[in-house]
Image (cartoon, rainbow, N blue to C red):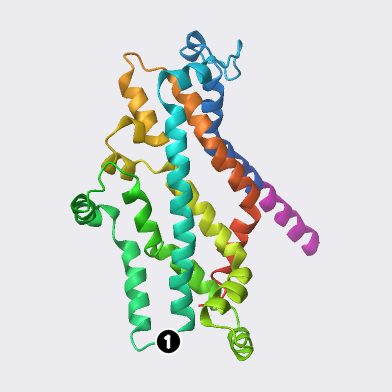
Amino acid sequence: MDNKLKNSEAKIRKIITYVILIIAAIVCLFPFFWMISTSFKPMDEIYKMPPDWIPLHGTISNFVEGLKGANFGVYFKNTAIISFLATVGTVISSSIVAYGFSRFKAKLSPVLFMVLLGTMMLPSQVTLIPQYLLFNKLGMIDTIWPLIIPSWLGGGAFNIFLFTQFFRTLPKELDEAAMLDGASSFKVFTKILLPSVKPVMLAVLVMSLVYNWNDFFSPLIYLNSNEKFTVAVGLQFFKGSQGNVQVGQMMAMALFSLIPVLIIFAICQKYFIQGIKMSGLKG
């Protein structure tokens, strides 16, 4: 009887857990569903009360008019270029720095690593003014370089931490064996270690890509010309340039901007989760 009672309680707890998770998932996905529904609705259906969750007269005119109404083709191209270059820089630079922390020991290495982790607690607004003044002195305001160069100079403390934790799980005997065969430190890094950390590499790639693709604050600060705007800034500019806010077109363009990120995340999801889980196995 005790075992049956325990099994029944376990089943009830599992059912309650699944019900809570399903409700939470519905709540989280509701805005996304509303965006999709609104992007296919004509204007008279968008403001209808009570609303129709499924468009009665679905149309793609919001997508067509949205692309015509602003330079969204240019915005998408700018965002793609910035996201690609910044993501590549993040993966390369953060992995190199992490390789140094995990494989080369110096007297101040632990202190420097703690300082690095401490920078994660600094809000971006703290470094905004000095960084802006620096790029202004270099004549890079209203160019894409302020959005790309920082990614090639370390790649971010959190990304370095992920790579470092994963590198530390790999036995140093691999390095020593390769060096005995005449491999340099650079070859050990590129031929031995990097192929072994693909899950973390893809996790950093996805996080960096999503961040750079959706970033609104930095492009707003550094970009002034309409033809250099990213999608995030372009959407806000499109909203402000319309006398009456075209909600359907806004939702259509927002949905359109999400598609590349969703595709990449769907492809790399397994490696992304694996990288996050395994990075903390050994410290």
Residue 279: image location, x then y, percent? 55, 69
Tell me: residue 56, above or below residue 232. above
Residue occupying image coordinates x 79% and y 63%: 3
Q: Nearer the viewer, residue 115 or 128?
A: 128
| Residue drawn at the location 56% of the way across and 36% of the way down | 259
Residue 28 visible in this rendered orientation of the protein: yes
Local crowd size for mark 1, using a 10 Å CA cut-off: few (<14), some (14–19), many (≥20): few
Q: Secondary structure beneath disc 1?
A: loop
Q: Nearer the viewer, residue 223 or 221?
A: 223
User: Residue 106, relative to residue 10: is it above or below?
Assistant: below
Q: Is residue 24 visible?
A: no
Location of mark 1 (residue): 105
For this rendering, which residue is in front, 170 or 224? 224
Where, quadrant-wise, is the N terminus in this rendering?
A: bottom right
Q: Position of residue 122 (x, y in %)?
A: 29, 60
Locate residue 180 relative to residue 151 in the image: left or right: right
Q: Quadrant of residue 4?
A: bottom right
Horizontal side of 149 relative to 279 (left or right) equals: left
Q: Residue furthest bottom?
A: 180
Image position of 193 with respect to 210: above or below: below
Residue type at numbered disc 1: Lys
Taking the magenta stretch, the answer to whether it contains residue 10 is yes
- Residue at 63 percent of width and 46 percent of height: 266
* Residue 246 percent location from the top left of the image: 41, 17
Q: Position of residue 130 (x, y in %)?
A: 19, 56
255 relative to 130 in the view: left or right: right
Report the residue that reaches farthest toward the top.
44
The stretch in magenta equals 1-15
Q: Residue at x 63, y 71 (%)?
A: 196
Q: Is residue 212 magenta?
A: no
